[in-house]
Image (cartoon, coloured by chain):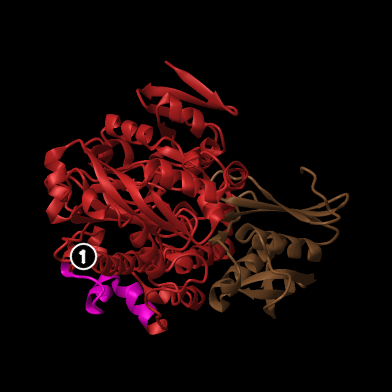
Amino acid sequence: MRPFNRETVSYALRDHTADVAVEAAADDLSELFAAVADGLAAAMCESVPEDGGDCFPISVRAESREALLFDYLDQLIYERDVRGVLPVDNRAAVHRDGDEWVVEATARGVPLSAVVAREVKAVTYSEMRVEETADGWEAYVVFDV
Amino acid sequence: MKTREFDGIRLEQVREYVWEIPREGDMRVPARVLASEELLEQIGDDKTLQQLRNATHLPGITKHAICMPDGHQGYGFPVGGVGATDTENGCISPGSVGYDINCGVRMMRTNLTYDDLRGKEEELVDSLFANVPSGLGGGGIVEGDVDTVNEVLARGMDWAMEEGHAVEADLLHCEDEGRRPDADPDAVSQKAKDRGKNQLGSLGSGNHFLEVQRVTDVYRPEVAEAFGMEEDQIVVLIHCGSRGLGHQVCNDYLRRIEKEHGDLLAALPDRELAAAPAGSPLAEDYYGAMCAAINFAWTNRQLIMHRTRRVFERAFGRDWEDMEMHLIYDVAHNIAKKEVHDVDGEERELYVHRKGATRAFPAGRPEVPRAYRDVGQPIIIPGSMGAGSYVLRGGDASMELTFGSTAHGAGRVMSRTQAKKEYWGETVRNDLRDRQKIYVKAQSGATVAEEAPGVYKDVDEVVRVSDELGIGDKVARTFPVCNIKG
């Protein structure tokens, strides 16, 4: 993994011929999920307003960590289209519940009318990684643009 | 025999422009790349060849997995990929159709000439931008409810005609007359319908656009005449797809496959190739949902085209019928269709997956609209906003070489992140206007930078190879005048 400054940002947008990839690192899974979600917002919008918009909750349950990340990001894209907002300032809490994984999250929904944003069509499984490392957790996700 | 190797993947040249990755290991069939040496260098520069080789693992894949001349890395199946799988013993693969189901292109002709338009470019581009929804959260031409979405999913352009957004001639000049009979709206999730209801009649963003163009060259006059095209004529090209509805259909079924057919998925080298076994309830459901999303996309492009007619009416003070603004054709890029093909002398029904590839049926095929059956299906290949686009016709060699397919565009060579480092949107826009008289208006300067002409392959070379191979024959070339995007 190429380095990025963990002090200020925990994700980076990476090159992909047609689409865009988000690489993220964090101390734990919860921070990792939120960092990838913030990366998704960054892939859509260069300049996110520091305030404005209401927070909304997201709760997703899936059979594995990767599936949970996929469904969580898919849900954020769904909320974007249905609420008409850009989900930013993502907070996430990930835990295991028996055979399943659960994320309880919130996002601040900045009205799309208040930002210049481009569409990310979908999250993909292509090259997806969610891995524990000596320093914490890392993820790599390709989004279809 | 000439050979090339990229990242450990060896290709053997079968004949000019045809390269083969021989079958080895768990590959079910060989893979083929249709490219000149120049295009092959670009195709070999990312993970396209690895993805193409992975696609040969799909159950029931027939003859070859094929990469068109504009191929580039995607996810799962490469963009520019064609793979035909058996409808009895094979599979259907949502991942090999892609997220934007029936992303495609349509072209509308007019009887206006470039001289009629000169001097009105800025007014026209502003008016198109104001009247055709684009970008994120821009809404749609029709603010539908779920009942409307269900009607669109079931009936496609029939619905548009009934609601006054189309005329019968539009349907007669669209693939399948703008309606997939196998569509099953019940197989489309509520979540997908929720996303679609606010986006019906919208361009979206990314590489989607609406472009007013002028015809600069005609290569096959008799075919161009059949398409209603001539030099110096103004035409309109619309590129978009099934919006959030189609994206959600793809993801819904990828996840269902993961849960219900994990064994098949585990045998594939890439999860994004996710496939449902032919004949399974899931395969039937996906086919019904995908066909419904195809109808949604056709209706989406129809609404935008009809709105464009209204914009032209205001700009030129004439009825659209008087300006002869008629649909030439509408082609799908991301699709899997049941088609019958000759495989080693045997007629077989196949799911032909085209992901970033265009159907290119030659003259005589019953699927080609009656208006074009004697000359072959029109194929529209958009270039970048600073380069020409092409209209081709289905070539005689396409059935043998590509399951009746050819390229779909120029194909990217530079990532979006890199493009934003190399280009500044405003500079690109001004250069296009000042140097080439191309007027661009976009929601976001970053989109203009990401879609700068320099990020695409040479569309001339892509089309030349298609023409030389006889899979899609050059008919006419067009050049941008006005371009709007999200």
Identity of the residue drawn at 14% across and 39% down: B221
Q: What span is in magenta?
A: B148-168
Q: Is residue A40 left or right of residue B219?
A: right
Q: Picture quarter containing residue A141?
A: bottom right
Q: Is residue B2 left or right of residue B114?
A: right
Q: Main secondary structure of the magenta part?
A: helix
- The magenta stretch spans residue B159: yes
The image shows residue B172, relative to residue B462, as above or below, that is below
Indicate the chain coloured brown by its letter: A
- Label 1: how many Cα within 10 Å (few below 14, some 14–19, many 20+): many
Q: Is residue B373 left or right of residue B67?
A: left
Q: Could you tell me which quadrant the N terminus of chain B lies in?
A: top left
- The magenta stretch spans residue B129: no
The image shows residue A136, relative to residue A74, as above or below, that is above
Residue tagged 1:
B171
Identity of the residue drawn at 79% across and 56% down: A10
Identity of the residue drawn at 44% across and 72% down: B199
Residue type, mark 1 in image: Leu
The image shows residue B269, relative to residue B19, as above or below, that is below
Indicate the chain coloured red by its letter: B
**x, y (%) of residue B473?**
24, 37
Q: Chain of mark 1?
A: B
**x, y (%) of residue B93?**
46, 55
Q: Is residue B277 visible?
A: no
Q: Is residue B324 visible?
A: yes
The image shows residue B62, relative to residue B162, as above or below, that is above
SS for dot 1: helix
For the view shown, which residue lies furthest in the front direction? B119
Q: Nearer the viewer, residue A28 or B32?
A: A28
Q: Nearer the viewer, residue B157 or B222?
A: B222
Q: Picture quarter containing residue B154?
A: bottom left
**x, y (%) of residue B237?**
32, 54
